Amino acid sequence: MMNIYEEIKVILVRNGKSMSKVLRKMKEEGHNVPFPSNLSKMFISGSIRFRLVQELLDYLGYEFKIVEKKSK
């Protein structure tokens, strides 16, 4: 199972985008997002805020969805 950081990196690659370019555009549009190096550190350390993940996914055209596990 991939973590959310890996999932977002896959989304970026599929769309031919880089994290730094996406964050730069988001900043230009008034979003309160960190610099790419800080964002990477947040993901790696596990200190990323859920709201920031939602905002980033929304900007990329995705949504975070929680679903109940199917029983075995």
Image: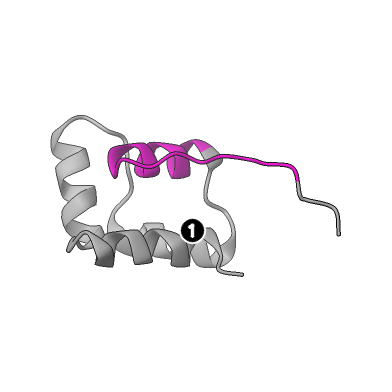
Using a 10 Å C-alpha cutoff, classify the residue at mark 1 as few (fewer than 14 neighbours), some (14 to 19) or many (20 or more).
Answer: some
Q: Note whether 1 is above or below 22 in the view shown.
A: below
Q: How many marks?
A: 1
On screen, residue 55 versus residue 31, left or right, reads right
Image quarter for residue 17?
bottom left
x and y percentages locating residue 37 in the rendered image: 33, 64
Q: As rendered, which of 67 and 45 lies closer to the eye?
A: 67
Q: List the residue tagged with mark 1.
A: 42
- Residue 61 within the segment the image draws in magenta: yes
The x, y position of residue 35, in whole percent, is 28, 54
Outermost front residue? 72
Which region is colored magenta? Answer: 51-68
Instruction: Place residue 16 in its image quadrant.
Output: bottom left
In front of the other: 71 or 34: 71
Identified at 32% across, 42% down, the residue is 33
Q: Relative to residue 53, is residue 24 drawn left or right?
A: left
Q: Magenta span has 52?
A: yes
Q: Position of residue 50 (x, y in %)?
A: 54, 41
Amino acid type at image mark 1:
Met
